[in-house]
Structures are given as structure tokens and as C-alpha cells.
Amino acid sequence: MELPGGLAGTGQEDRKMEFNVAQLMKEATGARREFVLDDDIADLDGGLTPLSNLTGDLELLRIHSGVLATGDFRVDLSLQCGRCLEPVSISAFVKFSESFRPLTDIQTGRFLSPEEFEGQAEDLTDEALLIDAQHILDITEVVRQNIWLSIPIVAACDYIDPASGARDPDACPKYLNLLSESALDGSADEQTPSEAKGIDPRWEALLSLQNESPSD
């Protein structure tokens, strides 16, 4: 495994998802670096509960406008089942390919404005896609966003239906119990005032007259 200029083998552990691409930026288009990541992301996002390290492969490819970062990662997360509301473990598979542009010229140190590059304006000004003045390429925010994109909208538990022996979250007893409670609550909410108070429905029309003021 090659390391970019400025990084030693042990330094990568300290810097996690930050990579010094100074040497790569000096090389010809097509030059590349490859990494195998195994990072603790417990502090990546307060809304995420990782159960494992983020593991996978990263390739940094020198392109005309900067560096193309291509990642293929996996991380196990704890989510809440959208049915029974119990904790459930899922594996998130994170894949991305993003172009990072340099903030300064590698040879002269001159500041490079977004207008000097081709591409979408929002991408060229996105701080998450910039190689900073110290030539550090940081994939942290890209990884964080793509983890969220890889999470299912509604997570489901792994309940196995004893009758069929197959995975069936809809047969989860806790889920069915919640449905039953919800149905009972809904029935109570749909009761008319007369039903709730035990008043004969034939007299219900008179209830609205109790609080009305006499007409002038």
C-alpha cells in the first residue's frame, strides 16, 4: 500500500480520513494512491451509533482539476426498528466518487479561484471538496454524508416468524402490540362527545346550544 507524500505508516492512524496529497499533485494525470481504511468513527456524527469501525478501500487519482477520490466502505450501525422501535443492527455500504480541487497552486502557492476550474458552481465552492492550503484532502464530510444516504429510510428488525421460519418484521409481536395499542387510541379519539360522555345521541344536537349566547 502506497502512502502519499508527507505521511508515514503510523501517521495515517492519527489523521484518520485526512491525506496529504502534495506529492500526488506534483505528478502527472493518472497517478494514483491506494489505501485500506479501518477507522473508528464514533465521533463522526452525533446522530450515528456505529457498532464497528469503518472499513474499506480508498483510491486517490490525479486528474486535470485535482484529485478524484473513490471510496468503497462498510460500517455496522445501530438504528431503531421502524416497526417495533427496538434497536436493530444494519450494515451500511458506502460508495462514492468525488472530485476534490486544490485551494492553492502546488508549485507557486497562488490562491486558485473556483472560476479557474470547470464544473458545477456548488461543487467548486463546497468546502468539503477542497484540498486545503497545506495540501490536505479530507474525506470526512463526504463519508459522513454518504453514510446517511446509505441508511434505509425505515429500518426493520430481523424477527423470524416461527410459523414460516422466514424473516418477517411485520409479524414481530412487539410491532403487532404497538399496532393494537394505536388502533385502540384511534378508536377513542374518533368517539363523539356523546359517546365519550355516555349521552344519548338523540340529544347530541342540543349540546351545541348550551354555550351559545341568546340571539339579540
Image (cartoon, grey):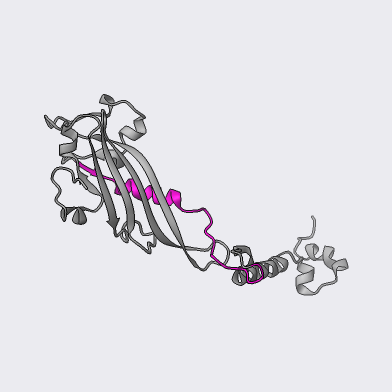
Which residue: 31% across, 25% down? 118
Quick check: is 147 in the magenta stretch?
Answer: yes
Q: Is residue 170 above or below residue 113?
A: below
Q: Splitting the image into 4 quarters, where does residue 103 fall?
A: top left
Q: Residue 166, percent across and down?
A: 61, 64
Observer-nearest residue: 155 or 130?
Answer: 155
Q: Is residue 176 left or right of residue 71?
A: right
Which quadrant is the C terminus positioned in?
Answer: bottom right
Q: Residue 124, percent across and down?
A: 31, 32
Q: Is residue 149 left or right of residue 211?
A: left
Specify the segment rendered in magenta: 136-164
Which residue: 83% across, 66% down? 204
Q: Residue 94, percent across and down?
A: 39, 49
Quick check: is 160 in the magenta stretch?
Answer: yes
Q: Splitting the image into 4 quarters, where does residue 114 fall?
A: top left
Which residue: 16% across, 56% down? 10
Q: Is residue 93 above or below residue 193?
A: above
Which residue: 25% across, 25% down? 116
